[in-house]
Amino acid sequence: MQLTKHWAAQLDDYAIDLAWSPDGGTLAAASAAGPVSLFAAGNGARLHTLPGHDNGTNCLAWSPTGGALATGGQDGAVKFWDIAAGQHTATAPLGNAWVEHVAWRPQKSSAPLLAASAGRKLVFLKPDGALAHTFKDAAKTITALAWDPAGGCVAAACYGGVTLWDADDFLAQKEFPYANGIHALVWSPDSRWLVSGNQDPSVHLWIPEKDIELHMSGYEGKVKFLCFDQTSRWLATSGGRDGCVWDCSGDGPEGREPVMLPHDAPICAVKFQNTHGVLATGSADGVVQLWSVDRAKPLRATVKMPVAATQLAWSPDDALLAIGSEKGAVYVLKCEA
């Protein structure tokens, strides 16, 4: 397997978020300073530069149809953008707290809905920016959001636990107490597992349908990055100088030895392909590696970047790997077997 440079571009600040459009034709890259750049996948041409948010942009999310982009910023607002025109279409002010998380309801669900959080506030917004619902304030600042892949609920985490909020009647489906800080949330694609990456440092797993919990500890540091592969078997986690991948088949990873993927510096990003089984990991020394975790010798490719990655994003067809960096450089690499 080979990684070769396809194109590169430069932002004006730290690449804080990165995402491909659903059709794979456009890459959106948010600069921490505020602007959001839209690049053509084929040649890296800058299609539009959206002004983003005053004081800085924090996050972005493509609508399931790909025609619109939602962004959250330090101005306490969610903004909506028409991608074809490169135009701002709506603003939803959420208060004084930074908007740190935005996530669209999966396309397989009925009505398009955006979940957004700012401080302790969680809201659902419609594609035109109109407010669909405001939930009661969380006990602490919301630190992670993740939609159930079926679209029936969104999981919201804060210090003290996770709440599942129903997307149709807006009621709390379930609450999962956890007496520590939570940095990341991810669902398995089959909706069986809900997993948190934690401050303590550990990974905690729930099977919401069965009220079963598992706990995996022993990490070097706090776990900030999580990703499942498309089969829902493999769970990739950060938390030290090695990528740590758990086998979640059957009864789950408890009692099993994880697959360890060595780096020489702390892991700062993990991302499985969308429809294939290759995992990309990035570490703080600028190294990005590709792995096939079910092989006896899992390492498939290594590339050394000038600076550490902040984001990894596979194109929908898994042919391109986009890498955002601390110095604002965006690299798009072609992945070939």
Image (cartoon, rainbow, N blue to C red):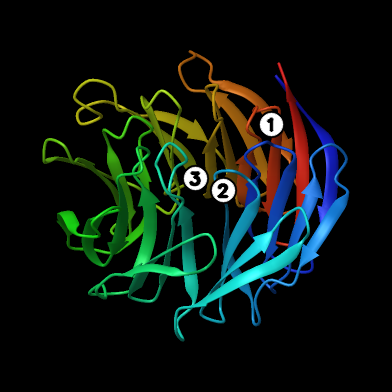
Residue type at numbered disc 2 = Ala
- Is there any visible trace of residue 262 in the rendered image? yes
Q: Where is residue 238 in the image (x, y as percent from the top left)?
A: 44, 45
Q: In this picture, is 128 found above or below 207? A: below
> Cβ–Cβ below 8 Å for labels 2 and 1?
no
Q: How far apart are labels 2 and 1 at the CA level?
A: 14 Å
> Cβ–Cβ below 8 Å for labels 2 and 3?
yes
- Label 2: few (<14), some or many (≥20) within 10 Å? some
Residue 131: quarter of image: bottom left
Name the one closer to the observer, 315 or 215.
315
The C terminus: image quadrant: top right
Q: Name the residue under label 2.
A: 265
Relative placement, left or right, of 252 versus 119 is left
Residue 34: quarter of image: bottom right
- Is there any visible trace of residue 328 in the rendered image? no
Q: In this picture, is 62 found above or below 254? A: below
- Label 3: few (<14), some or many (≥20) within 10 Å? many
Residue type at numbered disc 3 = Arg
Relative placement, left or right, of 310 versus 193 is right
Q: Mark 1 points at which residue?
A: 302
Q: Name the residue under label 3.
A: 241
Q: Quick one: label 2 or label 1, which is nearer the N terminus?
A: 2
Q: Where is residue 252 in the image (x, y as percent from the top left)?
A: 23, 28
Q: How far apart are labels 2 and 3 at the CA level?
A: 5 Å
Q: How far apart are labels 3 and 1 at the CA level?
A: 16 Å
Element assignment for label 1: strand
The N terminus: image quadrant: top right
Residue type at numbered disc 1 = Thr
The residue that appears at 88% across and 40% down in the rendered structure is: 43
Q: Quick one: label 3 or label 1, which is nearer the N terminus?
A: 3
